[in-house]
């Protein structure tokens, strides 16, 4: 394939699509980056990255070399189209394929014959055959003749310094052998990691929801352990670190204030709902989701216990919420446990002081020290490096009475020796 004469269009320039667009451009493809969000397009055109993303920051020079656009007609130029739009779940936790279906409709309306269409969005088994192919068919387009459909589930891990779009191995499935061949040759031209062909597109769809359900179940396991060990006065972090010395057949996960992000708390519902349609109940997946969804409230209960110990009422006491994003050192609020924790604190009429060094627009103070100064009690929600670099004596200096360590990342012993009440998740 002559990359210089091949145009790749990326539909959806988020955490998945933008690094992919930059990588394709870096490898020599002509790249059209399409997004509905004209603000995002404007900032990319000005060479400004619309969100924190190290991979793109390191390759800023390519931002000006992609055709960033919100006009769908540009898709007509593409030989390869990658669809990287969100596939959220709705309030009933049912998969919402709305954004994906409208992206596919846009691609269909601006179709060029012989296009390779690759879905990177997370979808449950059956969506390509039962939802996407019928959309093309309805427009008179036949797979394997007018277009070639493939699925390569995204695996971006925001903030991960070791694994990025270049070296993360990928799995690929297609509805046709030619589609599979073309998809493998495309990904081999931009990725150093292994490109693993799947037996069919259904298996490719199942891989992503399985790998993330695996993670959700393992987090639920240690979250439930944390609750039980809180009763038994066992330090769960110490136990997990001990178990992790076993060099095989154990994979450490750690309890916390809840599971956020756009993948882990969402993907299991794809499997749950699809299997339900086929008459199977994923009991274990459902219970794991219930356990993880209960952690924000559990964290607030721990705070209530500490307030009782220091004889402070929840109502009116300034509570410092340290961190808002769903994981350390990124600016992503999606499904963040902080949102549920803050909602519960508001219901209990607490005075909420909130600070996230990566999300200033949601913060109501402008620094960690200002948060410490204005708070009486703290909940650490996100283990940002900035918080971990604090010397515990600062908590004493600012008169902090109690700390709930929602990520078990602070020095419990030192804090308690300073006379500050401490409770982690599964560790006291
Ligand atoms: N979490 C825990 N305990 C753990 C691990 C995570 O409570 O032991 C929480 C985190 O605080 C966060 C949520 O779960 O709120 C998700 O954490 P994550 O590390 O899984 O972060 P994500 O959502 O960015 O997950 C991505 C996923 N990548 C994709 O789905 C493409 C996931 O598959 C990866 O395993 C994960 O990155 C990673 O870190 O490898």
Image (cartoon, rainbow, N blue to C red):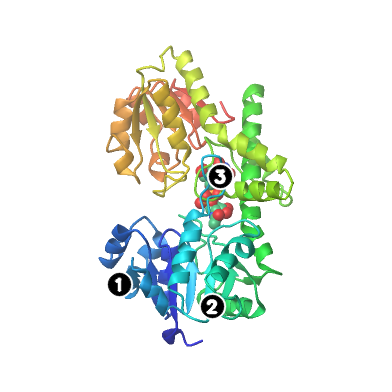
Please name the residue that numbered disc 1 is placed on. Answer: 64
Which disc is residue 186 wearing? Answer: 2
- Residue shown at 48% from the left, 72% from the top: 81
Q: Position of residue 33 (x, y in %)?
A: 38, 69
Q: Secondary structure at mark 3?
A: loop
Tell me the distance, in whole angstroms, between the alpha carbons under discs 3 and 1.
35 Å
Q: Secondary structure at mark 2?
A: helix
Cβ atoms under marks 3 and 1 closer than 8 Å: no
Specify whether tag 3 is near ligand 1 (CB below 8 Å): yes
Return the residue nearer the eye: 198 or 224: 198
Classify mark 2: residues with Cα within 10 Å, few (<14), some (14-19) or many (20+).
some
Q: Secondary structure at mark 1?
A: helix
- Residue shown at 61% from the left, 71% from the top: 194
Tell me the distance, in whole angstroms, between the alpha carbons under discs 2 and 3.
30 Å
Return the residue nearer the eye: 350 or 198: 198
Q: Residue furthest top?
A: 311
* Relative side of 179 to 301, left or right: right
On screen, residue 414 above or below 142: above
Q: Earlier in the sequence, mark 1 or mark 2?
A: 1
């Amino acid at each position: 394939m002559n990359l210089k004469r091949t145009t790749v269009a990326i539909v959806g320039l988020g955490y998945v699509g933008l690094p992919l667009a930059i990588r394709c451009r870096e490898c020599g493809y002509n790249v059209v980056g399409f997004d509905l969000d004209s603000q995002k397009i404007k900032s990319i055109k000005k060479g400004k990255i619309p969100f924190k993303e190290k991979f793109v920051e390191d390759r800023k020079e390519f931002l000006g070399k992609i055709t960033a656009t919100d006009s769908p007609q540009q898709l007509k130029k593409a030989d390869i189209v990658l669809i990287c739009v969100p596939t959220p779940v709705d309030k009933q936790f049912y998969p919402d394929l709305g954004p994906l279906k409208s992206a596919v409709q846009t691609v269909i309306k601006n179709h060029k014959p012989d296009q390779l269409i690759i879905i990177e969005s997370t979808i449950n088994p059956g969506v390509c055959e039962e939802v996407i192919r019928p959309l093309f068919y309805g427009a008179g387009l036949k797979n394997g003749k007018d277009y070639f459909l493939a699925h390569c589930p995204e695996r971006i891990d925001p903030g991960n310094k070791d694994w990025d779009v270049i070296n993360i191995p990928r799995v690929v499935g297609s509805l046709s052998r030619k589609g599979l061949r073309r998809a493998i040759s495309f990904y081999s031209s931009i990725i150093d990691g292994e490109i693993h062909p799947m037996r069919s597109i259904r298996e490719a769809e199942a891989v992503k929801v399985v790998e993330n359900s695996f993670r959700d179940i393992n987090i639920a396991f240690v979250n439930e352990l944390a609750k039980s060990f809180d009763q038994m006065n066992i330090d769960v972090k110490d136990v997990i670190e001990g178990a992790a010395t076993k060099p095989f057949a154990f994979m450490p996960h750690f309890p916390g204030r809840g599971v956020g992000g756009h993948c882990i708390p969402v993907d299991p519902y794809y499997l749950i709902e699809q299997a339900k349609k086929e008459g199977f109940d994923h009991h274990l997946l459902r219970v794991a989701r219930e356990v993880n969804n209960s952690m924000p409230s559990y964290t607030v209960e721990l705070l209530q216990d500490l307030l009782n110990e220091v004889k402070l009422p929840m109502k009116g006491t300034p509570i410092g919420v340290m961190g808002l994003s769903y994981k350390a050192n990124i600016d992503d609020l999606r499904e963040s446990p902080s949102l549920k924790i803050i909602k519960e604190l508001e219901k209990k009429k607490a005075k909420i002081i909130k600070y996230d060094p990566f999300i200033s627009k949601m913060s109501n103070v402008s620094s960690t020290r200002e948060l410490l100064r204005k708070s009486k009690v703290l909940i650490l929600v996100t283990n940002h490096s900035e918080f971990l670099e604090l010397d515990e004596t600062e908590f004493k200096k600012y008169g902090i009475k109690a700390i709930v360590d929602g990520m078990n990342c602070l020095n419990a012993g030192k804090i308690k020796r300073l006379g500050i009440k401490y409770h982690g998740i599964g560790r006291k």
